[in-house]
């Protein structure tokens, strides 16, 4: 895979596959525009599922530096990653919310090279939060 | 989860040596892979993508020449992209590598917002299903999310800080939306659910069910008794806001509830005591 151009945010798209909490027409339109853009991206079926399984591949997603994520509420996304021992880089992560924003807004935000960090910094840093629980046995 | 349990990663390759996909094909391939439970990387130079790790890889493309061949002892396979069969290709590779399958479990489990959590242990004392525990430093954590009852957000109602989220819940702040003061007050008002589920709900349930049993035992109509129980549970679900009737239905016996509640409360007390030492 290509070495990252310095500073350009990577793009992660969550398909929210295992529940319809993201409107299907919004996620389809966002994915469509992402595919039309010709930009590289990473698409995951369901971030919640990866977090529930403490999936180590979440660490890969946060390892490429600045990141834009199309999913749901930034507060939920922050702690889903943290629960899987893959804390987001809070100062350079932007979460676009497909539950409340329009598909055009989300797609434009993803495609823009300008990053607007919006994940709550909070009073607890990733280092203060407890160690994540061990992965479930399944 | 061991490193070898990393899920299959599918890469759509459109660089040198391959013909770029038409956007319709790209969309069709990515969507069908996601719906099949596979993560996809669309690689390219314009933006970084997460680096290669120990995940098994399936690299798909419309190759200009023959499909590249790799040694069978690596965790990398190449394939010719066919949008109609892409999910089957990925499934075959997943099975070959023994990589984990995803779904169909709806990922329903509590996620703690540690910016808000005060480590009061109310959730630990409340949950009858052993979802919560503490880490070595006696901080609350979600340990057994598989035990959580799908669609039941009850523990988020007992948290005095509105720190427990269920990202797939319908409304805020439980779904992760920001917490307002009025949310906080509303959450506090609902705290009695803890007491209710620990005892009162069950005793109400039992009383109603006993009443129903004596009434229906005369009629010997099991279906009607069941319908009454269902009605009662539905009313209780309304009383307790949004706890699904099937969750109340699956509550263990009164003795078992008492045993688990004592155990959970003892765990909570022990964790609190350890904090103050
Ligand atoms: S992170 Fe949000 S958008 Fe993604 S699967 Fe979970 S609830 Fe759905
Ligand atoms: S009830 Fe809320 S504040 Fe208390 S320990 Fe649980 S998550 Fe933290």
Image (cartoon, coloured by chain):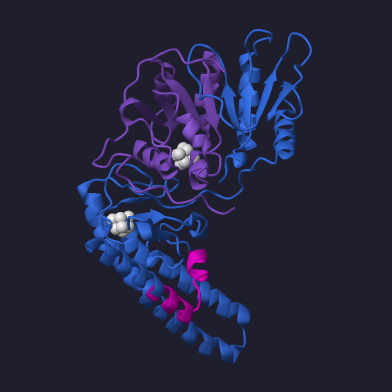
Could you tell whether B13 is left or right of B252 in the image? right
Chain coloured blue: B
B90, above or below B217, in the image: above
Outermost residue, right side: B66
Q: Position of residue B268 (x, y in %)?
A: 33, 66
**Chain A appears in which tint?**
purple
What is the magenta range? B245-262
Give the image quarter of residue A79: top left
Q: Position of residue B249 (x, y in %)?
A: 51, 70
Outermost residue, bottom side: B218
Give the image quarter of residue B276: bottom left
Q: Judge by depth and name the residue closer to the eye, B185 or A47.
A: A47
Q: Is residue B193 visible?
A: no
What is the chief secondary structure element of the magenta stretch? helix
Q: Is residue B135 visible?
A: yes
Write the residue at 51% across / 20% down: A34
Write the residue at 45% across / 21% down: A10
Q: Judge by depth and name the residue closer to the eye, B166 or A125.
A: A125
Give the image quarter of residue A72: top left
A5, above or below A31, in the image: above
């Amino acid at each position: 895979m290509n070495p990252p151009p310095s500073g350009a945010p990577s793009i992660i798209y969550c398909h929210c596959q295992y529940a319809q909490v993201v409107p299907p027409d919004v996620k389809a339109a966002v994915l469509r525009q992402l595919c039309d853009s010709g930009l590289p991206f990473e698409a995951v079926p369901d971030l919640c599922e990866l977090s529930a399984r403490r999936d180590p591949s979440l660490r890969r997603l946060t390892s490429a530096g600045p990141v834009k994520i199309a999913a749901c509420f930034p507060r939920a996304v922050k702690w889903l990653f943290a629960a899987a021992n893959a804390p987001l880089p809070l100062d350079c992560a932007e979460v676009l919310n497909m539950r409340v924003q329009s598909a055009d807004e989300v797609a434009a935000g993803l495609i823009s090279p300008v990053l607007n960090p919006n994940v709550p910094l909070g009073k607890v840093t990733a280092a203060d939060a407890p160690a994540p629980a061990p992965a479930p046995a399944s | 989860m061991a490193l070898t349990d990393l899920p299959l990663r599918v890469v759509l390759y459109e660089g040198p040596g391959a013909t770029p996909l038409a956007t319709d094909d790209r969309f069709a391939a990515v969507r069908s892979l996601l719906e099949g439970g596979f993560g996809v990387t669309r690689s390219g130079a314009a933006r970084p993508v997460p680096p290669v790790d120990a995940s098994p890889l399936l690299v798909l493309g419309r190759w200009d020449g023959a499909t590249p061949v790799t040694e069978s002892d690596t965790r990398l396979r190449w394939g010719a992209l066919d949008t109609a069969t892409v999910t089957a290709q990925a499934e075959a590779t997943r099975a070959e590598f023994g990589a984990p399958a995803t779904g169909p479990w709806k990922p329903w489990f509590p996620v703690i917002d540690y910016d808000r959590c005060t480590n009061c242990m109310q959730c630990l004392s409340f949950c009858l299903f052993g979802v919560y525990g503490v880490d070595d430093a006696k901080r609350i954590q979600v340990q057994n999310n598989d035990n959580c009852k799908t669609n039941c957000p009850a523990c988020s109602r007992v948290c005095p800080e509105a720190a427990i989220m269920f990202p797939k819940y319908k409304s805020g702040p439980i779904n992760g939306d920001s917490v307002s003061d009025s949310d906080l007050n509303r959450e506090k008002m609902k705290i009695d659910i803890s007491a209710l589920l620990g005892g009162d709900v069950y005793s109400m349930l039992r009383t109603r069910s006993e009443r129903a049993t004596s009434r229906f035992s005369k009629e010997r109509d099991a279906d009607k008794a069941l319908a009454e129980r269902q009605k009662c549970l539905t009313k209780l679900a309304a009383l307790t806001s949004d706890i699904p009737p099937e969750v109340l239905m699956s509550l263990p016996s009164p003795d078992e509830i008492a045993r688990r509640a004592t155990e959970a409360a003892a765990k909570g007390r022990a964790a609190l005591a350890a904090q103050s030492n």
